[in-house]
Amino acid sequence: MPSPTNYTDTYLDKGRRKRMCEELKRHGISDALVLAAMGEVPRHWFLDPSIGANAYEDHAVPIGCDQTISRPSTVAMQSQLLAVKKDMKVLEIGTGSGYQTAVLCAMGAKVFSIERQHGLFVETKVKLLKLGYRAQCYYGDGYKGTPSLSNAPFDRIIITCGAPFIPLPLMQQLKVGGIMVIPVGETEQEMLRVTKNGETQEEWVVEKCGTGSYRFVPMLEGRQVNR
């Protein structure tokens, strides 16, 4: 994808992405679609320019509004657990910097993304459009899903913040046969993959995925106006 005039993607940047993807493979990422997308999307476009060469290291980075961009390994792992196929409708809770959004778009998904932090929503929506990632972005309460139920049901749902529980309204917007990937826990989270095999909770299949625990920013109710 050609870059806008005020964004650069040098041979050095491309080389860093290649090395990042090689490291992801060593950490068990094998989905060709995920690796191709993460090899394509310039992570440094979604970070402060001062981060520079460190943009492709496996660290979470602050992005403002008390939020962070997840480590590349976490983005890759969540994306792999989603098992996305081209043209699937994916609901993302927590747009943040837009990096995970862009990776999903590069995987061929039709992405609908919700952000509760107004400052991030405005900045990221403009950036994604400018960069050519055609996600539909909403300012809203992630616990409730998309403002218009006409977008539901979704093939996949990904939550990029730590939820205290699996939100029922989101499961109701997930297609039967669909998959949700969600980190659940208060201070620390376990990564869960929830397969919806029917409309009742008894028909959900919940799997614990990944190794160890995670520390995501908390999933909060309502919308936040940043001053």
Image (cartoon, helix red, strand yellow):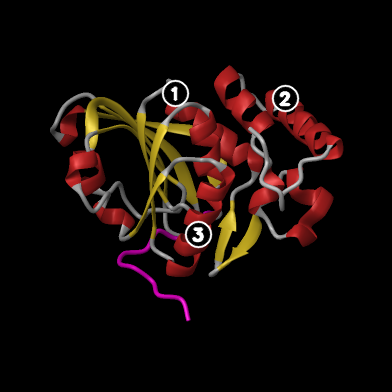
Where disc 3 sits, the SS reads loop
Measure the C-alpha gap from mark 3 to mark 2: 26 Å
Q: Residue at x 64, y 46 (%)?
A: 71
Q: Find residue 83 and name its label.
A: 1
Hey, what amino acid is under mark 1?
Ala
Say which quarter of the image contains residue 25. top right
- Quarter occupied by the N terminus: top right
Of residues 87 and 117, the one drawn nearer to the viewer in this rendering: 87
Of residues 146 and 9, the one drawn nearer to the viewer in this rendering: 9
Give the residue at mark 2. 26
Q: Find residue 215 and name its label.
A: none
Hey, what amino acid is under mark 3?
Val
Give the residue at mark 3. 217
Evaluate whether residue 96 shows in this view: no
Neighbour tally class for label 3: few under 14, some 14-19, many 20 plus, Cα within 10 Å: some
Hey, what amino acid is under mark 2?
Arg
Of residues 164 and 196, the one drawn nearer to the viewer in this rendering: 196
Q: Earlier in the sequence, mark 2 or mark 1?
A: 2
Where disc 1 sits, the SS reads loop
Q: Which residues are magenta?
A: 215-227
Of residues 139 and 215, the one drawn nearer to the viewer in this rendering: 139
Residue 141: where, in percent of width, then height?
30, 60
The secondary structure that dominates the magenta segment is: loop
Neighbour tally class for label 1: few under 14, some 14-19, many 20 plus, Cα within 10 Å: few
Number of numbered tags placed on the structure image = 3
Q: Earlier in the sequence, mark 3 or mark 2?
A: 2
Residue 24: where, in percent of width, then height?
69, 29
Give the mark toward the camera: 2 or 1: 1
